[in-house]
Structures are given as C-alpha cells and as structure tokens.
Image: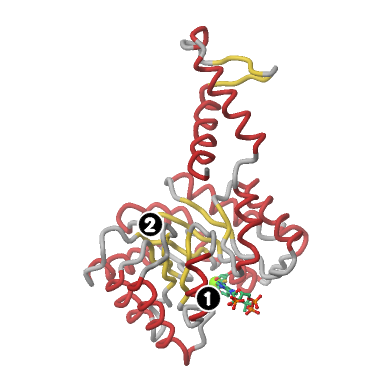
Amino acid sequence: MPGANERALEKAKTLPADSLILDLEDSVAPDAKADARAKVAAAVKAGGFGRRELVIRINGLDTPWGVDDLRMAAEVNPDAILVPKVARPGDIVNVSKIHFGMGGAEKTRMWAMMETPMAIFNVREIASVHQVARLSCLVLGTNDLLKESRALATGGRFAILPWLSMTLLAARAYGLDVIDGVYNDFRDEQGFRAECEQGRTLGMDGKTLIHPGQIAACNEMFSPSPEEVAWARKIIAAFQLPENAAKGVITVDGKMVERLHLAMADRVAAIAEAIS
Ligand SMILES: CC(C)(COP(=O)(O)OP(=O)(O)OC[C@H]1O[C@@H](n2cnc3c(N)ncnc32)[C@H](O)[C@@H]1OP(=O)(O)O)[C@@H](O)C(=O)NCCC(=O)NCCSC(=O)C[C@H](O)C(=O)O
Ligand SMILES: [Mg+2]
C-alpha cells in the first residue's frame, strides 16, 4: 500500500493479510516521498498490526531517497526491507550491509523485487547471496517486467511465464520464499482468481495484492483445499500404520505414495494447521 496513504495504513490493521508492504517507491509521487517516509515510520513505530509481517519497500539506492528510506527502516526495524529493481547480487548485499551498518535489527530480512531483465538473467546469483544478505524472499514485479521487456500480459501471461518459473526455481534452490506479482484489474475477481491459480500451479507461495478486495480470494486460492488436506492426512495416517513403518513405498487409494509424498503431506497438514 502507498506509504503516503494514511487511511490505507490505518485500514491495514484490520485486513486479513499475512504481510503488509508499506511502499515508498513507485506508488508514491516524488513530491510526497518525505511525507510518505514519515508516515510509514510513525505507523511502524506505533504498531497495532498484530501478527501481520511488516515490510517497507524502499526507493533504490540510485535515487535521491533510497539512503534516507534505509535510515528510517534501521530506526523502526520492520520484519523486512523490500529492495526494488534489483539487477545484481551486489544490489541486495549493499542494502543489507548499509542497513546493518546503520544499526538495523537482526530480525530484519531482505526481500528482493525481481522486475528487471538483468534480474532474471542473474536470479540464481541473486538468490545465492541469501546468507550474506539475509535475503529471504523474491517478489515478482510483473508490471516493471512488462514495461522493460515490452511483453504483453495477455493470454494467461504466457510471455512472462519462463521468467516466473526461473525465479521460482532459483528461490527453491536456495530455500527462499517467492511471491507472485500484482493483478492490476482489481475489480475483476474472475481474472484475479485465474491468475492466483496459475501462480499456485507454478509453485508460488502467495501473491502481492493492491486492494483489500483481493485478499479473501487470494487467501482461499493459496490455502490447501479441503480435498488436499484430506488426502495429506490420509497419507500421514497410512505411513503411521505399523505394517508400513519400515516401507518406502505404499499404495493409498490405488496410487503409489513414497516418503517424499509424506514430506509433502506433512507440509500441507502443517499449513492447514497454521491457518486454522
Ligand atoms: C488502486 C487504488 C488506487 C484504488 O484506490 P481507491 O479507488 O481508493 O479504492 P477503493 O475506493 O475501492 O478503496 C476501498 C477502501 O479500501 C481502502 N484501500 C484501497 N486500497 C488499499 C490498499 N492497497 N491498502 C489498504 N487499504 C486500501 C481505501 O482506503 C478504502 O477504504 P475505506 O475508506 O475504509 O472505504 C488503491 O487500491 C491503491 O493505491 N492500491 C495500492 C497501489 C500500490 O500500492 N502500488 C504499488 C504496489 S504494485 C507494484 O509496485 C508493482 C511492482 O513493483 C511491479 O513492477 O509489478
Ligand atoms: Mg515495480
């Protein structure tokens, strides 16, 4: 949500979203940057956001506002700092070094916007600095990717699907979370649901949103369905049977199930438990 929008910052305290990204970058006009920074600082300091993760999206270090944004973030200690328009591993390492050099809290993680052609070419190297830069999440910036590539968002996003998948694989290779890009037509629930389903099918952990009206559908689409949870519990129960204790592969409802499926089932059950 735009950091300059006080009403949105207040409303965020009541929204059923897991994470809140307080934006100082592209949704804030140049003349409103300082005001937005002050509003975000006051909101994060005052708290009241419950268990929602607080993420501040700063301006790039190559802009007149980036360093002041980082200084503010080091004072208020959000859960994460989202770095826009990352192109190379050094971009995220620099922000992390400056943040911790300014006395920023240990708990603050780095999130990286993947939204430039160079970022997609370098995604593996960017993900690989996760330990040194405390990087924990990659976020697709599909608007900027469309702008930079001149691709179109039509046809189920087929033009950008390889970039989404490359980002996803790099994230998984290094144990990072990965969140899909925004859906701009926020009154079109059907189209939004279709894009959530596509993101989930690709393996995304969630989706970035721009409007409160998108939250309920997103939560539903990215939660395990009752059928998935029931299937997961069936697999767990089957492997708990004494006769299966030493087996690597069994049959459940006519399907081959191995211990890798048990690991997947454990994850689904844990997510369902956390949600409930
Ligand atoms: C898109 C909007 C400008 C629409 O605003 P508006 O017309 O005011 O919406 P509504 O009248 O329907 O709002 C209804 C109520 O909901 C509140 N609201 C609206 N949006 C938000 C929000 N994002 N967070 C919290 N609350 C919100 C309104 O205040 C109304 O509340 P109430 O007064 O109680 O009725 C607007 O939704 C908006 O600004 N959205 C976010 C834009 C944004 O953050 N953009 C940056 C992120 S996207 C991005 O950066 C992409 C990426 O980098 C890339 O490259 O792809
Ligand atoms: Mg962007």
| Callout 1 secondary element | helix
> 240 or 14, which is in the foreground?
14
Residue 245: percent from left, percent from top: 47, 12
| Callout 2 secondary element | strand
The number of numbered badges drawn on the structure is 2
Which sits earlier in the primary sequence, circle 1 or circle 2?
1
Quadrant housing residue 155: bottom right
> 129 or 264, which is in the foreground?
264
Give the crowd class for mark 1: few <14, some 14-19, many >=20 residues within 10 Å. Answer: some
Q: Quadrant of ligand 2?
A: bottom right
Q: Residue at x 73, y 55 (%)?
A: 194
Q: Residue furthest bottom?
A: 31
Q: Is mark 1 within 8 Å of ligand 1?
A: yes
Quadrant housing residue 127: bottom left
Q: For mark 2, what is the residue?
A: 135
Residue 3: percent from left, percent from top: 47, 78
What colour-coding does the image apply? Answer: secondary structure
Q: Which mark is residue 8?
A: 1
> 194 or 42, which is in the foreground?
42
